[in-house]
Image: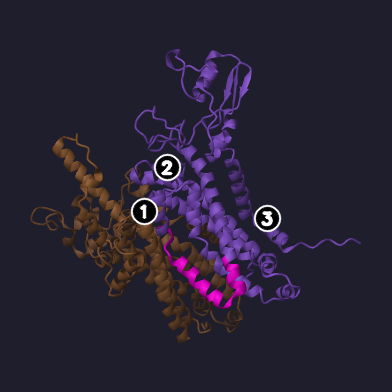
């Protein structure tokens, strides 16, 4: 007779989470979108995926992947000269090849050469000043969501803004949880005067108006992405300490902790190897809502003009432009819809996670 | 238990000192403060003045345009000639005497500036907060009683929307649709009252003729509107912002109400009440509801901090000259006396609000014991 191995609490929770369809599908959708967002240089970009020219293959999107995705390093550009690209009046073109025009040029020449462009052939920081009329331009069949006040494609900016917002929120949540857990664990485990004193300090730090300080600091340092993550994390680790502290207070009185002390384990091992796994519930159930909060804060900061440095694609920055010219409805509606949908998906995930970790069964008489 | 609350009151002092010391330090350490700002203004004024005289050809050393004494004078005005801790104690000494200093830019007493704007912020925030309770409690009750029904499911969709939409963002969207004129132009873009007769709502115009509400020079005077018209015009301006304040707490409150009522409905005393033969209305509305309202009532203490926290975004979307907007503009303008003044008021109100909600908790629910 074989015994079936019983499921661990984590497996049970995962199974319960999968049964909550709304949250589970939201998770799958959001996770897929986030993964896809790392392929954005091949989906929304003005650099071609493949260029075939004179029997040679070029991959401008691929060689610029790191630059276009993370804004690191230098762009490896192919000059227009390389493909013999010509401008008006068949003059040779200078600077980087314009792949959109190159594509039509090759078609006209009807040779073997071809260009495969990404489905949306625009870069988020490219200005389309040659369009008719003054920017911002209304949505059209070419620029689906219109352009912003610098004539940049709104769809491209929203798409890149999605990855930046989610990455930003994930990093802040991770960093602030990391420090929040350490502080909360020490307060809860050691207790006594250490706890009383520490709690006062956490309380003081928590009573500082968060966005005020971030605005003062970011007005002065005009921070990069990483610096903004650091500044925001410094002022958002306090919330989780209260829960961790409470969990540690409860757990440390249990027998397994006494047993660990008796066997001579050191305090750090007891805290982080034995107690922490049992104190994870509040961390995991609050994480989705912390992410929602961070995304909303980033959008708010960008909206006020104290967020990410200027050419960075961001939802809040488009909203700021919308505030300045309310009649350009596309500048308000599309970023807001992008934000609402994203936050909604995360909220659905959060509700399902909470339900999976802490199923409430209501007994009802009628 | 009074010992507990006395201790809590005393703990306000160290927290308040800690918060103000940290923010005070940041304002002094961070470059680009008020002094640099004034020097820059001084230089710009001097440069434009000189270029006016000489036709712009004269390039002067910018430092020479600031007289020796003036720099010292400016430093003295901001207490920057003293070490940080001395300046902090001077500030604190004044705060204890309820003097928050004068604004760097307008030279107005900070306390007066705050007093002027406080009613505006409170009017908007409080209306939204009260409205949120008035909507959430009945909706939460209905959802709890009809748990699992189509109504529950459909209303959950709206409630979840409330979780994911920050109030100010909704405000921007509503402005585009109802005030920009691109779709509709039925509501004002912002501010708290109408500035000219033409912009008044039609209803008010039919109520008060233009001559009645103008001064001797034909200028529109809002104060001259009849009481009824004032109410109409104010609500016309308050509609959208208040909606944004409401959505902020609406979702949380509704779900709290629903869950709390459902929890109570499963209790034995409810079974007893039904067994006695009481009508379902009496059981739900009298027996269960009273206990279910406890978690919601404690939230009342936090009203102030919620109103303060959300306000500067909503206030800047709707151009409402309230406390949050004042704080934001003085932050941007590095008017640190105003920033510190608002911080002082906010911190004290928030800390008192926290205690108040615990007091409420203990008053309403005799089972709660703080020690």
Q: Main secondary structure of the magenta part?
A: helix
Q: Which residues are magenta?
A: A183-211
Residue A321 in the image, given as x and y percentages of width and height: 37, 43
Residues indicated by labels 1 and 3 sit on the same polypeptide chain: no
Residue A300 vertical position relative to residue B263 in the rendered view, above or below: above
Q: Residue at x 35, y 44 (%)?
A: B183
- In this orientation, which residue lies closer to the viewer: A11 or B128? A11
- In this orientation, which residue lies closer to the viewer: A251 or B184? A251
Read off the chain for label 2.
A
Which residue sits furthest right? A1
Residues indicated by labels 1 and 2 sit on the same polypeptide chain: no
Q: Which residue is mark 2?
A: A310
Q: Which residue is mark 1?
A: B31
Question: Are circles 2 and 3 on residues that touch, CB within 8 Å?
Answer: no
> Alpha-carbon distance for marks 1 and 3?
52 Å
> Alpha-carbon distance for marks 1 and 2?
21 Å
Q: Nearer the viewer, mark 2 or mark 3?
A: 2
Among the chains pictured, the one given brown colouring is: B
Chain A rendering hue: purple
Q: Residue at x 55, y 81 (%)?
A: B278
- Residue A205 lies within the magenta run: yes
């Amino acid at each position: 007779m074989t015994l079936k191995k019983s499921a661990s609490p984590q497996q049970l929770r995962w199974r319960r989470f999968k049964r909550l369809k709304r949250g589970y599908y939201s998770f799958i959708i959001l996770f897929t979108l986030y993964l896809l967002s790392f392929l954005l240089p091949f989906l929304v970009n003005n650099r071609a995926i493949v260029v075939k020219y004179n029997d040679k293959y070029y991959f401008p999107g691929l060689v610029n992947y790191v630059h276009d995705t993370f804004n690191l390093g230098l762009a490896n550009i192919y000059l227009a000269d390389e493909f013999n690209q010509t401008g008006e009046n068949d003059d040779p073109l200078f600077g980087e090849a314009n792949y959109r025009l190159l594509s039509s040029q090759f078609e006209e020449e009807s040779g073997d050469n071809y260009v495969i462009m990404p489905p949306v052939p625009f870069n988020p920081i490219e200005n389309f000043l040659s369009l008719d009329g003054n920017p911002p331009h209304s949505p059209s069949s070419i620029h689906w969501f219109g352009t912003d006040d610098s004539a940049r494609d709104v769809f491209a900016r929203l798409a890149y803004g999605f990855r930046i917002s989610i990455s930003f929120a994930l990093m802040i949540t991770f960093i602030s949880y990391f420090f929040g857990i350490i502080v909360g664990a020490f307060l809860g485990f050691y207790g006594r005067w250490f706890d009383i004193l520490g709690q006062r300090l956490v309380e003081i730090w928590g009573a500082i108006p968060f966005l005020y300080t971030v605005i003062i600091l970011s007005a002065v340092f005009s921070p990069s992405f990483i610096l903004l993550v650091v500044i925001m994390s410094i002022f958002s680790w306090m919330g989780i300490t209260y829960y961790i502290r409470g969990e540690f207070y409860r757990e440390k009185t249990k027998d397994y902790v006494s047993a660990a002390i008796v066997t001579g384990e050191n305090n750090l091992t007891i805290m982080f190897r034995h107690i922490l796994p049992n104190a994870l519930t509040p961390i995991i159930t609050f994480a989705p809502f912390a992410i929602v909060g961070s995304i909303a804060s980033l959008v708010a900061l960008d909206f006020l003009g104290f967020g990410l440095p200027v050419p960075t694609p961001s939802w809040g920055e488009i909203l700021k432009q919308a505030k300045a010219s309310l009649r350009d409805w596309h500048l308000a509606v599309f970023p807001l819809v992008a934000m609402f949908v994203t936050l909604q998906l995360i909220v659905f995930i959060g509700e399902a996670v909470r339900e999976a970790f802490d199923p409430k069964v209501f007994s009802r008489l009628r | 238990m009074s010992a507990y609350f006395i201790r809590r009151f005393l703990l306000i002092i160290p927290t308040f000192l800690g918060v103000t010391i940290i923010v005070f330090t940041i304002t002094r350490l961070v470059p680009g403060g008020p002094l640099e700002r004034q020097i820059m203004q001084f230089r710009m004024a001097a440069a434009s003045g000189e270029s006016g005289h000489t036709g712009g050809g004269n390039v002067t050393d910018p430092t020479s345009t600031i007289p020796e004494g003036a720099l010292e004078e400016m430093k003295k005005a901001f207490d920057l000639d003293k070490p940080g801790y001395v300046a902090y104690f001077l500030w604190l000494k004044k705060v204890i005497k309820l003097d928050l200093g004068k604004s760097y830019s307008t030279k107005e007493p900070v306390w007066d500036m705050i007093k002027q704007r406080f009613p505006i912020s409170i009017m908007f925030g409080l209306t939204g907060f009260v409205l949120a309770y008035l909507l959430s409690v009945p909706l939460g009750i209905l959802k709890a009683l009809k748990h699992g029904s189509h109504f529950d499911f459909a209303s959950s969709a709206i409630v979840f929307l409330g979780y994911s939409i920050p109030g100010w963002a909704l405000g921007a969207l509503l402005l585009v649709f109802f005030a920009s004129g691109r779709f509709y132009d039925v509501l004002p873009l912002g501010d708290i009252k109408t500035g000219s007769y033409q912009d008044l709502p039609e209803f008010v115009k039919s109520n008060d003729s233009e001559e009645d509400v103008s001064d001797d020079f034909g200028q529109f005077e809002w104060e001259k509107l009849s009481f009824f018209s004032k109410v109409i015009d104010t609500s016309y301006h308050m509609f959208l912002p208040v909606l944004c304040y409401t959505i902020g707490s609406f979702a949380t409150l509704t779900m709290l109400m629903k869950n709390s009522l459902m929890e109570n409905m499963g209790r034995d005393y409810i079974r007893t009440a039904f067994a006695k033969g009481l009508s379902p209305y009496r059981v739900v509305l009298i027996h269960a509801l009273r206990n279910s309202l406890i978690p919601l009532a404690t939230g009342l203490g936090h009203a102030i901090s919620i109103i303060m926290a959300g306000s500067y975004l909503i206030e800047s979307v709707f151009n409402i000259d309230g406390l949050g907007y004042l704080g934001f503009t003085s932050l941007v303008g590095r008017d640190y006396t105003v920033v510190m003044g608002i911080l002082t008021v906010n911190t004290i109100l928030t800390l008192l609000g926290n205690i108040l909600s615990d007091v409420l908790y203990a008053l309403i629910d005799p089972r709660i014991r703080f020690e």
